[in-house]
Image (cartoon, helix red, strand yellow):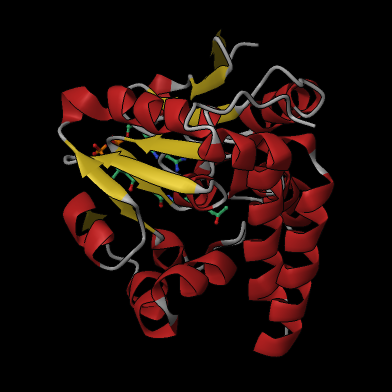
Amino acid sequence: MESLIFEKADRIGIVRINRPKALNALNRQVIDELESLLDVLEGDETLSVLIIGSDEHFAAGADIRSMVRMNPAEAKTFSFSSTLDRIANLDIPTIAAMEGFALGGGMELALACDFRIASKTAKMGLPEINLAIMPGAGGTVRTPRLVGAARAKELILLGETIDAVRAEQIGLINKVVEPNLLMEAAMEWAQKLCQKAPIALKTAKESIGGGLNCATISEAIKLESERWADLFHTADQKEGMMAFIEKRVPIYKGK
Ligand code: CAA
């Protein structure tokens, strides 16, 4: 891999985009390498959490130089919606650790993660409208679900960049930290997530995602209650509740 750097710290995977000269803009190579990495990570049972980050700038969007002369068919092929969907659909929790610019497709990559933690100096937005296009990798779909339609339109139609404090205020990101504490904060959340029962995490993720996609609240509640009851098949549920009763820390097996 040239455009990505991957390392593993115990059960936590950390992937960093590595195209510093283009502010980590996402070109075909980055996306292809991300696809290959996902092929490996999806089958890695020793992985409990994935952190996605980069050095200096999270990602300044899809690579504009690659897109400038594309026709619609080529744009369809270039689109990395499906790659970001793979990230959104991972069984394990994912955290975007954002610093510098997180714009356009870069912001959409962060939106595909379960959590977004940003450095106080991060700048983010969906500026595609300024290129006479619109977000095409989940931005128009995931942003309104996080911040509501009016604020999503503010970001997408005005195309202005906002700072991390504002992003946290409107619910676009989860947490703002001092720049030198970004990876530490992401690791802290990752370590907390590593303590939880993996099947319960996966099921909760599915229930939240599935619930948001249901046409009615009652349909979502029904699905939630089925998923909730299914968790009682797991050994980890027995262990989690026994540990509470016996006043000890649970030891989960992921079963
Ligand atoms: N694509 C390709 N190259 C990019 C890039 C991008 N998205 N963003 C930055 N770069 C390159 C610049 O071209 C420049 O390269 P050169 O030195 O070779 O000219 C280098 O990175 C440094 O950028 P700047 O000189 O522009 O740095 P700056 O500090 O003055 O400005 C910036 C930083 C505000 C982020 C500015 O680079 C910028 O506006 N970038 C584009 C942001 C954008 O519009 N992103 C959305 C892309 S479209 C998209 O993502 C579609 C989608 O929905 C999937």
User: Image point 54% across, 22% down: which residue?
Assistant: 15
- Name the foreground residue: 193 vs 9: 193
User: Image point 48% across, 35% down: which residue?
Assistant: 25
Q: Answer above or below: position of 157 versus 186.
A: below
Specify the quadrant of the image occupied by residue 58.
top left
- Name the foreground residue: 99 vs 19: 99
Q: Answer above or below: position of 142 versus 163.
A: below
x, y percent for residue 81: 69, 53
- Name the foreground residue: 44 vs 81: 44
Q: Answer above or below: position of 30 versus 86.
A: above
- Judge whether residue 56 can be spotted in this image: no
User: Image point 29% across, 22% down: which residue?
Assistant: 184
Specify the quadrant of the image occupied by residue 28.
top right
User: Image point 47% across, 32% down: which residue?
Assistant: 247
- Judge whether residue 46 can be spotted in this image: yes
x, y percent for residue 179: 18, 29
x, y percent for residue 87: 66, 42
